[in-house]
Image (cartoon, helix red, strand yellow):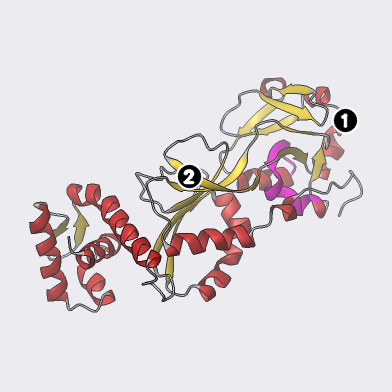
Amino acid sequence: MDIEALRLFVIAAERLNISAAGRSLGLAPAMASARLAKLEHELGAELLHRTTRKVSLSQDGAAFLPYARDILAQSEAARAALGLNAQQPSGTLRFTAPSSFAQLHIMPLLPQFHELYPDITLDLRLSDTRFDLIEGSFDLALRNGPLQDSSLRGRKLGDDTRILCASPDYLDRRGTPSVPQELGGHDFLSWATTAARDLVDATGQRFTLDPRSMVCRTILDDGTSQRIATLAGAGISINSHWSVAHEIRAGRLIHLLPDWRLDDASVLWLIYPRSNVLTPKVRCFMDFLLQSLRPEAWRVQSVTPGAGA
């Protein structure tokens, strides 16, 4: 199978423009169309629907696209193993991550990454709703939680410790709980699930945090929105260290019950499909994130109520 024809198809599928895909590979429009037609004839399937107005991906093309990407990845990795890819890593890298984490910690790093690797295009899908890595044809993802899926591999970025916090204004109005039992009756900002969660302290003592014992009038599925609502004084919330460390150091949020944390063993992972090879573009982006993101900088240093900003 013609590797360059596959490369042309993948670019055309991403851009939905055959002429632009051809130009990116130094091909005239007529040559690009002929090369794609030859690939389709070889496969016995129409990969792209063409009209005078637009190009769209066919059902067969959508099914074939992840395999075409994988063949290209395998080819790049094989050439790299033989020392045939001495040039800078290049191509489009599809990456998905929680939007709240990416906004705080990854977006500020993009200029530095692009300066180091100018030939890599990052196709980012940022959402606190998880995408399926394999069906979405993603090269890499940032996930929090146990790595339980056997079809995935990953490298640990750091622990994702979750804590309780609230704004000084809210605590001035409603009082500061000093033990978990005093959480009952407080306003609570819940995640999408209002299921009971366990808190644990350093001695192993446990307490079940049940939103039904609190006033839960706001349910959120976005970490940034939850942090903003907590800052505004809407109530007590559960947040990751990486989300609120800066606000707590500045005194804009108060770390409540500092001897207690959510007991969910959550971890930040950089993961990729087990079937995928680590191409140069994926390896360099993963290494860049592992070197640039420092979990120790997210550790919370608490400010006592009344001593902050």
Image quadrant of residue 94?
A: bottom left
Label at residue 178 = 1
Q: Earlier in the sequence, mark 2 or mark 1?
A: 2
Residue nearest the viewer, comparing 252 with 296? 296
Q: Position of residue 217 (x, y in %)?
A: 64, 30
- The crowding category of the residue bearing disc 1, from other C-alpha atoms within 10 Å (few below 14, some 14 to 19, many at least 20), is few
Residue situated in front as seen by the camera: 28 or 51 = 28
Residue at the extreme front of the image, as rendered: 82
Q: Residue at x 17, y 79 (%)?
A: 28
Residue 179, percent from left and from top: 85, 27
Looking at numbered disc 1 in the image, what kind of residue is underneath it? Ser
Quadrant holding the N terminus: bottom left
| Amino acid at dot 2 | Arg
Q: Nearer the viewer, mark 2 or mark 1?
A: 2
Q: Quadrant of the C terminus?
A: bottom right
Tag of residue 153: 2
CB contact under 8 Å: marks 2 and 1: no
Q: Nearer the viewer, residue 283 or 48?
A: 283
The residue positioned farthest toward the right in the image shown: 307
Q: Residue at x 76, y 28 (%)?
A: 200
Residue 274 picture location, percent across and down: 41, 45
Residue 182 horizontal side relative to residue 83, left or right: right
For the residue labelled by badge 2, is the local secondary structure a helix, a strand or a loop?
strand
Q: Is residue 108 above or below residue 246?
A: below
Based on the picture, tell me whether residue 243 belongs to the magenta stretch: yes
Q: Tell me the distance, in whole angstroms, between the alpha carbons under discs 2 and 1.
A: 41 Å
> Which residue is at a point 64% across and 43% down the rendered structure image?
226
Residue 249 lies within the magenta run: no
In the rendered image, is residue 95 in sight? yes
Q: Which residues are magenta?
A: 233-248
